Amino acid sequence: MTLKLGVLASGRGSNLQAVLDAIDAGRLDAQVVMVLSNRQDALALERAASRGIPSIYLPPSDYPQRPDYDRKLAELLKSAGADALLLAGYMRLITTELLEAFPGRIINIHPALLPAFPGLHAQRQAIDHGVRFSGCTVHFVDEGLDSGPIILQAVVPVLIDDNEDTLAARILKEEHRILPEALQRMAEGRLRIEGRRVIIE
Ligand code: GRF
């Protein structure tokens, strides 16, 4: 069934773009029904607006209590008809207000092989730690930081002369590949969460 996807994004929105491209190419049975951002200057908002997708900047300063902000997000997403939520470079932690509005239906993309290097600057963390391989993870969102059940991962090498930017670029390519893939599995109803594990049927 066509996935009615709401998207939260804080930045340039290249993952959102990968999702839109996959939809256009017929590789992803989804419709992006709304894009919301906590940043007015998020390029993601422009990308969505240029395609006629409702795109809204919701200023966090209007909602000093985080749950109130998330309740408003949930309300807007529901009114747009969203039945799943994608965090595509959304740089805020979400609260139970959103988790309960989309139980088991929130997906995040993270630029490291979780559970290694959660949180900010995952690529720099990987370089600083000296790992030979890193990558990206598409996972369900739970109440923790980048801690939910893992759907798909992709691996890239970390080269000796990599810096944060070169590694990020190599990882981003894989993000753009596995994110639409994971969403398509969700659209097909093939993802089942069993404890920490995601079964792909
Ligand atoms: C990506 O690296 C994603 O993994 C992380 O934030 C970045 C967002 O990039 N969560 P973009 O806004 O999708 O281009």
Image (spheres, grey):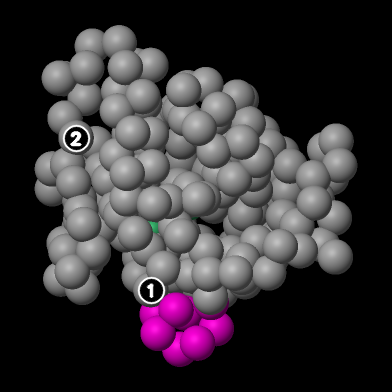
Direction top: furthest residue: 65
Residue at which label 2 appears = 58
Q: Is residue 124 visible?
A: no
- x, y percent for residue 112: 61, 50
Q: In this view, does 175 lie above or below 116?
A: below
Indicate left or right for 62 with 74 as reference.
left
Mark 2: secondary structure: loop
Q: Give the range drawn in magenta.
A: 21-28
Residue 16 lies in what quarter of the image?
A: bottom left
Q: Which residue is drawn at 75% across and 57% down?
A: 191
> Which is nearer the eye, 25 or 176?
25
**Residue 5: % across, % down:** 44, 57
Q: Can residue 191 be seen in this view?
A: yes
Along the viewing direction, whichever of 65 and 3 lies nearer the viewer: 3
Q: Which amino acid does label 2 sit on?
A: Leu
Question: What distance separates the C-alpha of mark 2 from that of mark 1?
Answer: 22 Å
Q: In this view, does 37 lie above or below 5?
A: above
